[in-house]
Amino acid sequence: MAVMAQKTVILYPSLGVGHLNPMVELAKVFLRRGLAVIIAVVDMPDKDSVSAEALDRLAAANPDIAFRLLPVPSCGTRPYSHPVMRAIDVLRVANPVLLGFLRALPAVDAIVLDMFCTDALDVAAELNTPAYFFFSSALADLAIMLHMPYYYPTAPSSFKDMPDTVLHFPGVPPIRALDMGATMQDRDSDVAKARLSQCARMLEARGILVNSFDWLEARALEALSRGLCTPGRSAPPVHCIGPLVLPGNRGGASERHACLEWLDAQPDQSVVFLSFGSLGTFSAPQLREIARGLESSGQRFLWVVRNPPEHRSNSGEPDLVLEPSLLPEGFLERTRERGFVVKNWAPQSEVLRHRSIGAFVTHCGWNSVLEGIASGVPMICWPLYAEQKMNKVHMVEEIKVGVVMEGYEEELVKAEEVEAKVRLVMSGDGEELRQRLLTAKEMTVEVLKEGGSSDVAFDKFLTDLMKNTCTENSAL
Ligand code: UDP
């Protein structure tokens, strides 16, 4: 009797915690469905320590998942016009290493690429292996990205030269040019050209898995399904399989973080949590404005603080010492009873699920947004880099899970604004938002249940994968 051999899927994340975390959650879904999975991670000679630490943490917390490091040659020290150009270069240089690694495996049935790993499509083509993308940002961002090669070349100018112009993309709320992705602001820059070419190449995949769900982004899903984002071309099927978020438990961590002990002692929904992704930093004057705003709001807070970029060491090591002079004099003493400052890094998903959290000031990275939604916590949107300003638009205008921290696009958000938004969301005025988040939280559970929309979407994707990899094992 012939039996189906176990399928092996390779997951290929790009660099950075925000890309690695959701890939690990995706790996768990494959494992639960009985597939073998390997996460192949580019091991950069000059990797940043945040990613290295995150990888160690993830590997320790997930012993069932096979992680393989692919050592890539150094790209040298030449200057890059943008950090994303460096990442694209590293991933391009990694192609022969990836090819060699895949060739040495007994079987590879499919490869799932992060959205920045478009060059690896060439590796998949050479091996005749089906390639899929895993898009770890909002579905609405995907709708915009797929439309960009149609829109941008004939737009009146670069986004940076028409910041207040309101743009219209299928399936997405109107969006000001200044809120478009940071890498796309200058149409003539190397990075915008590289990203546009990546957007165009996404159509070569067999399918695109997206870390979102149909209830959350119904309009974007409809636009993509009806082909409105790629007129005249057939786009690969889009499968909304999320939300895949870090679990709210400690995983491999041996000790409970001190901030969780502190949260245990706080009343329900009484604490504002401020955290700005894996890379978010503020200038010293901005840190002081935030501190003043928090103090005058009178609310309890848990704040993840990093030294400003100009105060960071050049060694690449995370700077663990927050210089007290960065905060207003006496701030830490005066707020000791109701505030907790964490340096650099907090166990965010665990914090967000804590019953004492009442609001989340976020930089709008998509993993953070999904973690906020899965925890039912209303958000205050303070976008900083990458595609976060676009996410802010989706969150406020479409999904309705947050309010804007006004002034985010200026040099300084004033203390009065921090105070006002914190008060707004924590008070009775935030009730509508809280109700919306409660519904959204319930939906995150519903869609992942057996027969829920994300579960069904994953089944559909698997059917496609199996159809294309119908290798049989005649053992037995
Ligand atoms: N994160 C964390 N602790 C921190 C900061 C971030 O655990 O102090 C996690 C967060 O929970 C999320 C990821 O790092 O899973 C950040 O991803 P996101 O997409 O939100 O932002 P990015 O870092 O990619 O800008």
Image: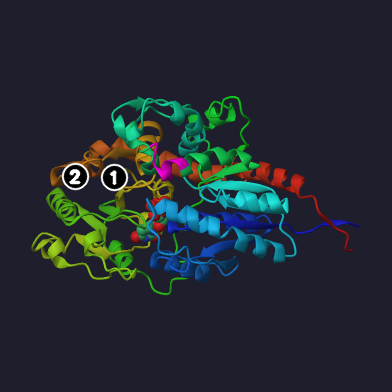
| Residue 382, numbered circle | 1
Q: Which residues are magenta?
A: 187-193
Please provide percent x and percent y for residue 231: 57, 25
**Which one is in front, 331 or 413?**
413
Left or right: residue 16 compared with residue 27: left
Question: Image point 32% across, 71% down: which residue?
Answer: 315
Q: Secondary structure at mark 2?
A: loop
**Amino acid type of the residue that numbered disc 1 sits on in the rendered structure:** Trp
Question: Image point 15% across, 67% down: which residue?
Answer: 324
Question: Image point 72% across, 44% down: which residue?
Answer: 463
Q: Is residue 458 above or below residue 334?
A: above
Query: Which quadrant of the structure image shows residue 66?
Result: bottom right
In the rendered image, which quarter contains the C terminus? Answer: bottom right
Left or right: residue 291 compared with residue 244: left
| Residue 413, numbered circle | 2
**Which one is in front, 290 or 430?**
290
Question: Image point 36% across, 38% down: which residue?
Answer: 186
